[in-house]
Image (cartoon, coloured by chain):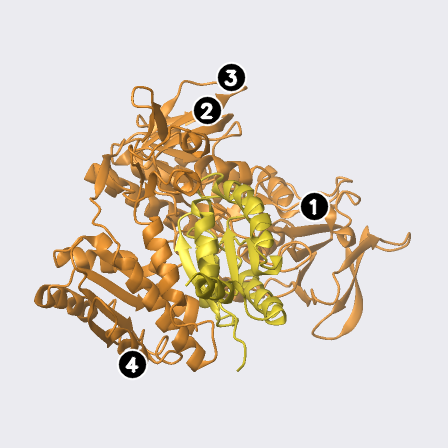
Chain colours: A orange, B yellow
Amino acid sequence: MEEPRIGVYVCWCGTNISKMVDVEAVTKEVGTLPGVVLSKNYKYMCSDPGQDLIIKDIKSHNLNRVIVAACSPRIHELTFRNACEKAGINPYLFEMANIREQDSWVHTDRTEATKKAIDLVIGAIRRVRYHEPLQKRSVNVDPATLIIGGGISGMTAALEIANAGKKVYLLERTDHLGGQVARFDLTFPHLSSARQMIRPMIQRVENHPMIIVYLNTELKEVSGYIGNFKARLVFNGAEQPEITFGNIIAAVGLKPFDPSVIAEYGYGKFPDVITSLEFEDKLRAGRILTKYGKEPRNVAIIHCVGSRNKQYHEYCSRVCCMVALKFVHEIRAALPDANIFEIYADMRAYGKGHEEFYAMTTHKQIIFLMYDQQKSLPLIREAYRDDDCNMLIEMNELLSGIDIEVPVDMVILMVNMEAHDNVKEVVRTIGVSLCGNQFFIEKHPKLDPVATTTGGVFIVGTCQGPKDIPDSVAQAKAAAARILATIAQGSVPVEVTTAVVNESFCCGCQTCISVCPYSAVSFDEAKKVSVVNEVLCKGCGTCGGCCPAGAITSKHFTDRQILSEIEGIMSMSY
Amino acid sequence: MNFRPTIVAFLCNWCAYTGADLAGTSRLHYAPNVRIIRIMCSGRIEPTFILKAFKEGADGVLVCGCHPGDCHYQEGNYKCLRRFKLLEKFVCQMGIEKERLKLEWISASEGKQFAELVNEMTAAILKLGPGKVQKTLELEHLKTN
């Protein structure tokens, strides 16, 4: 092995790290360790001057190993690997020490945090010595794309990709395209018709020569990897011929919350307590009538049903406030004399044109009543015989502090958006994960909101989190652009940190074959040894973890590397 | 001297390590004595890694992977769990208290749970006092020499 010549760079990250970690002390402490040629600190290592510093040093000091102690490797590992490559050394001869997310940001004692940073850097120094150059590999990209979900997000992405001349398989489990938007009457804040928007779009999708639409179809199984996926689809219980594609977009959306679990609202008990989606149905039918076939004289709209309430869902569904205001316009146009009550917890009008829309709505002779979610929900009950209405809402009006009764003939519940029941199956099938609210997790919440940690799998629309039509469309187009870019490139880099079998140590027990989730290990009957298919291997290292003979090496996570890292981080602790 | 326990934590890249990063981005504070080692999957963890950490003087070892069913590699966490059960027995037989070795599932969104976990484990180990593996090894070493 060549003698290691290590360069260590400690990042201040402005004050993010330097405030809690004495970067000067870290730099000094590790500078004299065996193999370390130089040790420096700089304000922002990820900046261009920071990277240039590394590149220059590699060349002038003949460095063959580089360590950056900075943020999480999940954020900038690739940045620095690229810098190493630019300077002419293999990108895998680099290692990162996470002294921000897992040190300066979580500790309050500067001495302890500095000590920890030193330990982590020593761990990296010991580890990097055993790093080996790995060669990049790439695979060809199948130009077809599978889109799961035929709502507005899925259709937008499908059209974007198909218009570039690339094939799209659009999968929808119901019998029609359009998703939730197909149920809407008007949209906020411009009160334009959802139907006029979605109908032509559905037609374009259905008639597009590059889009193959599968209705009533479920996704049974997905196998393969970025650029080269395969799927089995099930149509009406019958399995379809296998399809192949290079990328996946999940656009499975969300579904309306079922308010029958909230006892106070009596949904299911009172026929004229309906959900916002059921009210959209009435609007599209062109008639607002109660169960008794009469026009309601008093209509109440209750906000935050199932939202912003720890008992149901803690998150805000983002669109319901504006939809509720939209209802006001539609009700006022249809029933000029009706009393309209907006029973809200907070009015959220954060988007473009929303605040103006809110202001405009206040001129529609409606009564805004506020309630406190933390204290109690409004209670809907039957009216008394001689009351002039069907139901009464008992509530404490927050701004006046007074207990009031609101007469109503129809109550619209602004229901939350929540995950579909089968969402766990979907994420398992396509190999991505969910956050605590059962939304799909993006690769990076700010810098990469449409990708996932699984290569070739993208997420768009509400399955990533509640959002309105413009946000869903923007996300769909972003994912389409990402996919078209990889198709244009023709190939994508794949995992190089795969497993490899040392044939002379392999005892032929085949334990590795039984634990591999990707069937990447097979048995060579002639040689009586296991063989890893590097294209199928995703580098989890499970085979290496269980090999009794120590014949399997998990590249970049070898025993030697990990054991040395352990020695390093513990070397100062006594 | 005040006893400051050292915990070596092995975190899988996709769930637990991301969860620990989230604790950072959420500025949740926890005990500064945990040293995290990133691995791609909890299925990669060999008993040797854990024993090595104890040998090097760790007062506790923490292993975190994705929740059952959420493994990025489908089921590496189950494989880790099976091996762990066996290792737990072995470690106890070596005279290491069971509180010093822990396997927990942490999802990418559970920054808070991770911070709490580290604090709880630190508190438990503080009660137990320093790990004895290294001292024992030193004694053995003296005997044989």
Disc 4 marks which residue? A24
Q: CA distance from mark 3 to mark 2?
A: 8 Å
Pick whichever of labels 2 and 4 is earlier in the sequence.
4
Q: The numbered mark 1 sits on a residue in which chain? A: A
Disc 3 marks which residue? A238
Q: CA distance from mark 3 to mark 1?
A: 37 Å
Q: Is residue A279 above or below residue B128?
A: above
Pick whichever of labels 4 and 3 is earlier in the sequence.
4
Pick whichever of labels 1 and 2 is earlier in the sequence.
2
Q: The numbered mark 3 sits on a residue in which chain? A: A
Kindly indicate whether the residues beneath marks 4 and 1 are on one polypeptide chain. yes
Report helix, strand or loop for mark 1: strand
Q: Amino acid at mark 4?
A: Glu
Please tell me the numbered disc located at residue A274: 1
Q: Amino acid at mark 1?
A: Ile
Pick whichever of labels 3 and 2 is earlier in the sequence.
2
